[in-house]
Image: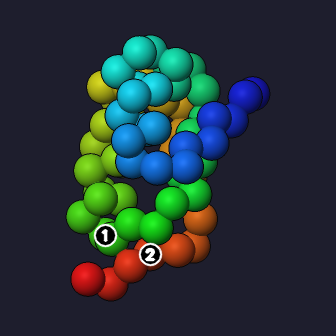
């Protein structure tokens, strides 16, 4: 199974909006707070993503 690496929230949105994430695993490697992480997880069904994982970098703001 392919894993798509997203280096920014913008790249996640762009790839999702153009159906590049459908059926793939996604790994996000950019810093984010818990709200952004929750938002990305909520997008999983809309973008038809198989699974989403994150690096351990989480900002507490």
Q: Could you tell me which residue is drawn at 43 percent across and 38 percent down? A: 12
Which part of the image, by quadrant, shows the C terminus? Answer: bottom left
Count residues near mark 1 (Cα–Cα under 10 Å), then give few for <14, some for 14-19, many for 20+.
few
Q: Could you tell me which residue is drawn at 35 percent across and 21 percent down? A: 17
Q: Could you tell me which residue is drawn at 57 percent across and 73 percent down? A: 56
Residue named by callout 1: 34
Residue named by callout 2: 58
Residue 30 percent across, percent down from the top left: 51, 60
Whether residue 18 sits left or right of residue 1 in the image: it is: left
Whether residue 32 sits left or right of residue 26 in the image: it is: left
Q: Is residue 46 above or below residue 28?
A: above
Q: How many marks?
A: 2
In three-dimensional space, the C-alpha distance between marks 1 and 2, rounded to whole angstroms, equals: 7 Å
Residue 32 percent across, percent down from the top left: 39, 66
Q: Nearer the viewer, residue 21 or 7?
A: 7
Which part of the image, by quadrant, shows the N terminus? Answer: top right
For the residues bearing labels 1 and 2, Cβ distance under 8 angstroms: yes
Q: Is residue 55 above or below residue 28?
A: below
Residue 58 percent across, percent down from the top left: 44, 75
Q: Secondary structure at mark 2?
A: loop
Residue 23 percent across, percent down from the top left: 56, 20
Question: In the rendered structure, which disc, 1 or 2, sits on the residue that comes first in sequence?
Answer: 1
Q: Quadrant of residue 38?
A: bottom left
Q: Quadrant of residue 3?
A: top right
**Can the viewer see residue 54 in this picture?**
no
Q: Nearer the viewer, residue 6 or 41?
A: 6
Q: Secondary structure at mark 1?
A: helix
Q: Is residue 47 above or below residue 38?
A: above
């Amino acid at each position: 199974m392919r894993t798509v690496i997203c280096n920014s929230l913008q790249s996640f949105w762009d790839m999702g909006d153009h159906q590049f994430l459908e059926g793939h695993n996604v790994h996000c490697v950019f810093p984010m707070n818990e709200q952004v992480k929750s938002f990305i997880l909520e997008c999983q069904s809309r973008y038809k993503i198989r699974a989403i994982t994150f690096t351990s970098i989480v900002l507490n703001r």
